[in-house]
C-alpha cells in the first residue's frame, strides 16, 4: 500500500489499483491513461517484463470495461538496451492495443531520444491508421519542424511544455519562452491537424487558448492532466463536454515520480505537509 499523500499522485502498486482509479475517473466523465512507472532499464529482462505488464494491462482494462488506454516510456521498454529491443517491445504493445481496441501513447523522453521515438510513432501510426499517439515538447526548438512532419500522419499528438532540462543550444529557456513556443505549437496544430490535438497541460491559459482555437478552426481536442493535479478542473472540463483524460501512474517504482511532483510545486509540498501533520 502507498503511504498517504503519495496515493494522491500514484494510483497504487499494481494494475488493479490503476484500473480502480480509471473507473473512479470514468464516473466523472474523465477517461484514464495508465502508465506503469519505470524508466532507463539497461537490461533486456526488465524491459521485456514491463512490456508483458502493458500487454496484461491492456487486456485487464478491456475486461474491466473501463474507458482507458496506456502510455509507455521508450527507455522503459528497451531503448537504453538498443533500438531493436525498443521497436520489438513497442510493436508487441501496439499489437495488444489493436487486439483490444485500446489506444497506445508513447511518452517523450530527453532530446537524445526524439528521432527514434518519432520514427517509431510514424511506423505504427501508418500501420494502425492512427491508433497510436506521441508526445512532443514545446521547450525543444526542433519541435516546430517535428510537428510539421506529424501534421501529415494519422494518430494523435500530445503537446506538453517539456519535463527535461535540455541544453540551452537546442532549447527554449525560461517559462515565458516555453509558454510562447507552446502557444505557437497549439496555433499551428489546431490549424493544420486533422486527427485532433491533445493538450497535455494544467495551465488554465493554455486550456483556454485551446478552447478558442477549437472555436476558430473546429479541430477536435482533448485535455490531459496528471492524477492529483487540478482534479476539480478535470471534472469541470469533462462536465462541459471536453474530452478529458487523467494520466494515472502506478507501480512499485512510485517514489521518484512522487518526489518530482512534490518538488515541482510548493502547493503540492504544503499539501503533503498538511496531510502528515493531520490538518
Ligand atoms: P506549468 O507551466 O507547470 O504550470 C502552468 C500553470 O498551470 C500554473 O501557473 C498553474 O496555474 C497550473 N498548474 C500547474 N501545476 C499545478 C498544480 N500542481 N496545481 C495547481 N495548478 C497547477 N513531459 C515530457 O517531457 N514528456 C512526456 O511524455 C510528458 N507527458 C505528460 C503527460 C501529461 C498528461 C501531462 C499533464 C504532462 C506530461 N509531461 C510530459 C509533463 C510536462 O512536460 C510538464 O512538465 C508539466 O505538465 C508541467 O507543465 P504545465 O503545462 O502543466 O504547466
Image (cartoon, helix red, strand yellow):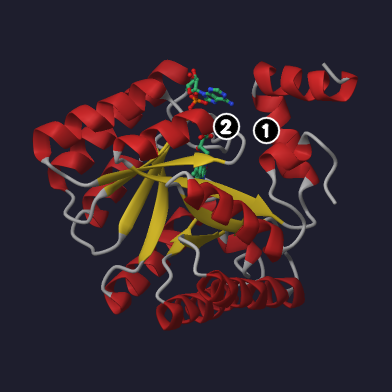
Please tell me how many numbered marks the rendered image carries.
Answer: 2
Q: Could one spot residue 205 in this view of the protein?
A: yes
Measured along the vertical axis of the image, is residue 212 above or below residue 111?
Answer: above
Q: Position of residue 168 (x, y in %)?
A: 50, 29
Q: Nearer the viewer, residue 14 or 185?
A: 14
Label 1 with label 2: CB-CB less than 8 Å: yes
Looking at the image, which residue is at 50% across and 69% down?
65
Looking at the image, which residue is at 82% across and 37% down?
4
Furthest-right residue in this view:
277
Earlier-in-chain disc, 1 versus 2? 2
Instruction: Tell me the residue that label 1 is attached to.
Output: 261
Q: Could one spot residue 161 in this view of the protein?
A: no
Q: Nearer the viewer, mark 1 or mark 2?
A: 2
Mark 2 nearby-residue class (10 Å; few <14, some 14–19, many ≥20): some
Furthest-front residue in this view:
27
* Residue 229 circle label: 2
Indicate left or right for 6 with 68 as reference: right
Amino acid at each position: 500500500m502507498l503511504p498517504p499523500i503519495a496515493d494522491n499522485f500514484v494510483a497504487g502498486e499494481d494494475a488493479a489499483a490503476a484500473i480502480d482509479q480509471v473507473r473512479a475517473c470514468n464516473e466523472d466523465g474523465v477517461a484514464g491513461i495508465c502508465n506503469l512507472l519505470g524508466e532507463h532499464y539497461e537490461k533486456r529482462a526488465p524491459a521485456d517484463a514491463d512490456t508483458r505488464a502493458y500487454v496484461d494491462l491492456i487486456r485487464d482494462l478491456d475486461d474491466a470495461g473501463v474507458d482507458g488506454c496506456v502510455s509507455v516510456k521508450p527507455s522503459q521498454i528497451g531503448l537504453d538496451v538498443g533500438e531493436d529491443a525498443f521497436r520489438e517491445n513497442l510493436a508487441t504493445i501496439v499489437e495488444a492495443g489493436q487486439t483490444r481496441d485500446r489506444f497506445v501513447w508513447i511518452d517523450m523522453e530527453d532530446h537524445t531520444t526524439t528521432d527514434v521515438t518519432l520514427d517509431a510513432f510514424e511506423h505504427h501510426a501508418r500501420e494502425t491508421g492512427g491508433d497510436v499517439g506521441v508526445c512532443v515538447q514545446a521547450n525543444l526548438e526542433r519541435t516546430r519542424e517535428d510537428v510539421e512532419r506529424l501534421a501529415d500522419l494519422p494518430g494523435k499528438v500530445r503537446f506538453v511544455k517539456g519535463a527535461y532540462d535540455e541544453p540551452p543550444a537546442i532549447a527554449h529557456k525560461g517559462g515565458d519562452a516555453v509558454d510562447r513556443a507552446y502557444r505557437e505549437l497549439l496555433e499551428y496544430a489546431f490549424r493544420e491537424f486533422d486527427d485532433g490535438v491533445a493538450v497535455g497541460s494544467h495551465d488554465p491559459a493554455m486550456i483556454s487558448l485551446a478552447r478558442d482555437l477549437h472555436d476558430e478552426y473546429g479541430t477536435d481536442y482533448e485535455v490531459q492532466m496528471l492524477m492529483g493535479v487540478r482534479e476539480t478542473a478535470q471534472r469541470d472540463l469533462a462536465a462541459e463536454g471536453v474530452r478529458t483524460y487523467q494520466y494515472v501512474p502506478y507501480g512499485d517504482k512510485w517514489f521518484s515520480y512522487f518526489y518530482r511532483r512534490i518538488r515541482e510545486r510548493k502547493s503540492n509540498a504544503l499539501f503533503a505537509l498538511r496531510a502528515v501533520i493531520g490538518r
